[in-house]
Amino acid sequence: MTKKKLGTLCVQAGYEPKNGEPRVLPIVQSTTFKYDSSEQMGNLFDLKESGYFYTRLANPTNDSVAAKITALEGGVAGMLTSSGQAANFYALLNILKAGDHIVSSSAIYGGTYNLIAHTMNDLGIEATFVEPDISLHELNKAFKENTKAVFGETLSNPSLQILDIETFAKAAHDHGVPLIVDNTFPTPIFLRPIEWGADIVTHSTTKYMNGFANSVGGAVVDSGNFDWDKYKDKYPSLTTPDETYHGVVFTETFGKASYITKMTTTLMRDLGSIPSPQNSFYLGIGLETLHLRMPKHYENALEVAKFLKNDDRISWVSFSGLEGDSQYELAQKYLPDGSCGVISFGIKGGRDSATKFMDSLKLAAVVTHVADSRTCVLHPASTTHRQMNEEELKNAGISSDLIRMSVGIEDVEDIIEDLKQALENL
Ligand SMILES: *Cc1c(COP(=O)(O)O)cnc(C)c1O
């Protein structure tokens, strides 16, 4: 299916029923799978044969939906996780261990920042944070002898900064390490990072991919482009015998699928953050309309951004689609067809006006979520990013008056009407 266009992949990729099988991807709600002999099952455990035996390691519903996302991103292998947090943790931990170092963009989701700056730091994995639009020259200085990966968000949540993917990919590859990017906000409909040089792509599928806010989930997709064997000493977990599988060397046995196979057979085995097949089913349904929903989110958001920009009660508006926006030029390059439905803005009068405004909204709900069909608003400094101190907030591009608005796919006239009445209320 790889030659097909994105809309076709959204609808059809990942599941091709054979004669007499269900037209719709079945929910295989079973923890385990039956075999006729112990020997057959033993071969599965030794990775000598492929097949399902326990849902923590693999499940047909989960696999089909992972294959759909892999096709959309143009990767060679992918897997689903129970959340976006798990996806980013697995993507990094799969190739890192205590004593290693990563270079990360500072413009990332609050949860990912905490994961990298604190939890992974406690595990002995150190990070250097850099701006998402840093020059190549400056970026090169962030690398150390023990740097094993570069991480960033293609379009950051909530600061809406665009990662200069080509620059980050070049620096990563010049230092012999992969670039891992979280592509949650644009989705592959608007941006396919592998085409710009990213090696591994992660997602919180909780957002636009699911699209309807009914299940938390994540995904990791490997491009298959990074040559782990070329840097054998740096990535021993992939390039040297794994004693827990009778000495299998993942790169030798699984080739381009080695990174994802290793993640499934060791991290998922040991840490177990699998999605329920039921949730993967919802995700699969959501993906079938991703190519229709993303342009609508973007169109609506652009109209809302223009409305806010022209209102003098609003102090600033940030949306990559607005001419003159700090991200406009990078957006022309990386996101020419659209970015997402999320905009951020500040209201004159600071924190108090922001809260009053948000509480007056009727159609737009105040929820800790973004990127679903229903319009919603959030004040990150007092919610998702409240663990950060002022300095960390500043580095993540979040001011204390920032309101994040996730524009849904309702009729835009009604969304704007709601904003108008809330502004009148100030
Ligand atoms: C929401 C989000 C995450 C975390 O995903 P969960 O599914 O909530 O665990 C990670 N990265 C980005 C960009 C996000 O928006």
Image (cartoon, helix red, strand yellow):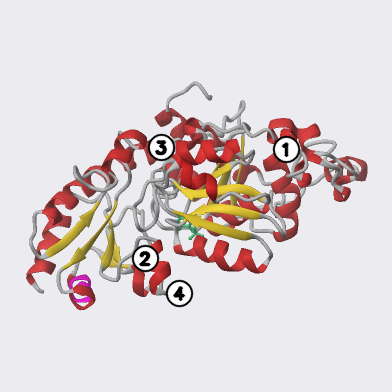
Magenta span: 354-358
Is ligand 1 less than 8 Å from the beta carbon at label 4? no
Whole-Å distance between the Cαs marked 1 and 2? 36 Å
> Disc 4 or 1, which lies upstream in sequence?
1
Of helix, strand and loop, which one carries label 4?
loop
Mark 4 or 3: in front is: 4
Give whichever of 254, 233 is nearer the camera. 233
- N-terminal of the two: label 1 or label 2? 1
Whether residue 165 is visible here, answered yes or no, is yes
Q: Tell me the element at label 2.
A: helix
With respect to residue 324, does 98 lie above or below?
below
The residue labelled by disc 4 is 387
Q: Which mark is residue 191?
A: 3
On whether residue 416 falls in the magenta region, the answer is: no
Label 4 vs label 3: CA separation? Answer: 30 Å
State which tag comes first along the sequence, 4 or 3.
Answer: 3
Q: Is the magenta region chiefly helix, strand or loop? A: helix
Look at label 2 and name its amino acid: Lys
Estimate how packed mark 3 is, as few (under 14), some (14 to 19) or many (20 or more) residues with alpha carbons within 10 Å: many
Residue ID for mark 2: 394
Tell me the crowding category of disc 2: few under 14, some 14 to 19, or many 20 or more residues within 10 angstroms, Cα based. Answer: some
Q: Residue, x 27% and y 65% (percent of image)?
A: 403
Q: Does residue 242 appear to the left or right of 376 in the view shown? A: right
